[in-house]
Amino acid sequence: MIKHSLITALLCLLAAPAFAQTTIIHAGKMIDVESGKVLQDQYIFVEDGVITNIGTKADVKAAKKDSAVKFIDLSKMTVLPGLSDSHVHLTSDGKTHGYKTLGVSLPRATINGVMNAEKTLMAGFTSVRNLGAPGFADIALMNAVDDGDVIGPRIIPAGRSLGITGGHCDSNLLPHKYKDKAGGGADGPWGVRTKVRENNKYGAKVIKFCGTGGVLSTGTKIGAQQYSFVEMKAIVDEAALLGLKVAVHAHGEDGINTAIRAGVDSVEHASFISDAGIKAAKERGTYLSMDIYVSDYILSEGEEAGILEESLAKERTVGKKQRERFQAAVRSGVNIAYGTDAGVYPHGLNARQLSYMVKWGMRPVQAVQTATIGNATLFGMQDKTGSISVGKFADIIAVDGDPLADIKELEDVDFVMKGGVVYKD
Ligand code: ARG
């Protein structure tokens, strides 16, 4: 409560959105994610939430004559664009898995979403794709954030994840007499088209479907393809008619290859992607969103959180292999997104995966690029966010150390601005 009123007071002080005030940020060092270079002493001009100029000392002098100008001194810090996560589940948390999830009502999940949205933003993540939520809760969350009622990142919500009957995106915990069925369940080309249309009707901004079994679902095989090519193609075609991109959950080779051929925009997990799969993704510009941190959490904290032995056993076969395939993907130069599956582990720790990406073959600046301009491009938002450039939203973060020397600096973000509003200082 106290924290909330403090934040509200801060926002009122700092945001002042009612009139076009200019804010100038003095960035001691700024990571230009487009060139991959670090620039010294940049002056970022922000007006109405948008970057209007990246100026010189002379511009600052001229602006100083206007007493309404507000200065933010980050001269001792490294400034970079707000980070982005292409795969989160804001309505879930890391401590509720397996049968424990049955005790979480939709309203409770939504409240979790409110809390997790704030944690995510405070960790420096100014945009996220929410790849699946019950009851369109993520769409309500997006609206609440956009309306300024909830503190959180920009949210691109998927609504309900599409999945085959009994597949990874269905609810398989209970016996038949309970008639439990996930909201996104759909079979056949027309069944999936209807589901895509429904998601669109209720406000989804991306379509997510499950193209193979998964680790955390009961009774599914990670290697087994789910949906035929015809169904996957129907999902992608229908989404295209509605102007929506498509993300597929896929661990096994066959599901991955078929989904890439059907034209998905990103493959989530991609754990067992083959060389041929990487090649196909590269040719088509498909992004790989490989969550190479979460395995450590699942195997150390998972049991306590309720993850079933069946799932732990599956995870033991995935973690290392996925990291090796990530390394192969990095070497190939295929598009890589920054997706973590936060929600399986606690929100706000989204940056933990960065050091894993560096350990498994990326230069620090490359890892930062996946989580900024890379994701923005995957989201189709590269004109609005993803770099500190004139005309884009002022989604800007800063840390006191040098993240390109030690990527873990980004696990402790000191300054967060989203759309010109300071949320953490
Ligand atoms: N949601 C995913 C699933 O259940 C999590 C996979 C996590 N494991 C991993 N190594 N990335 O399949």
Image (cartoon, grey):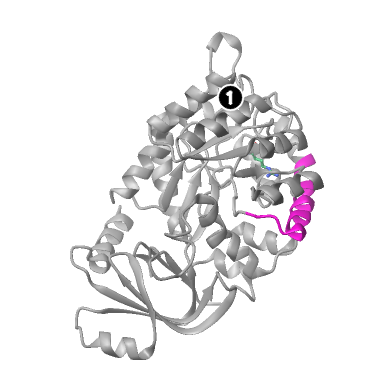
Q: Tell me if residue 329 is in the magenta stretch.
A: yes
Q: Quadrant of the C terminus?
A: bottom left
- Give the answer, above or below, for where 160 lies relative to 324: above
Please tell me whether residue 70 belongs to the stretch shown in magenta: no
Residue 56, image x, y percentages: 39, 87
In this rendered view, identify the residue nearer to me: 244 or 2.
244
At x 57%, y 34%, the residue is: 236
Q: Which residue is mark 1?
A: 170
Is 237 placed above or below 359 here?
above
- Cβ of mark 1 under 8 A from ligand 1: no
**At 21% from the left edge and 88% from the top edge, which residue is drawn?**
65
Q: What residue is at 44 percent from the left and 60 percent from the top?
A: 383
Instruction: Specify start and end residues of the magenta stretch as a single range.
Output: 317-336
* Snapshot quadrant of residue 204: top left
Question: Local crowd at mark 1 within 10 Å, few (<14), some, or many (≥20)?
Answer: many
User: Percent position (x, y) of residue 238?
Assistant: 51, 30
The reply, left or right, for residue 54 in relation to residue 281 is left
Within the displayed image, which quadrant is ligand 1 positioned in? top right
Residue 359 makes an appearance in the image: yes
Residue 13 placement: quadrant: bottom left
Q: Residue 158 or 12: which is nearer the viewer?
A: 158
Q: Residue furthest top?
A: 177
Residue 327 falls left or right of residue 29? right
Q: Position of residue 380 (x, y in %)?
A: 49, 51
In percent of width and height, residue 47 lies at 29, 70
Q: How many marks?
A: 1
Q: Could you tell me what secondary structure mostly forms the magenta stretch?
A: helix
Residue 303 visible to the viewer: no
Q: Is residue 56 left or right of residue 168?
A: left
Q: Secondary structure at mark 1?
A: loop
Q: Amino acid at mark 1?
A: Asp
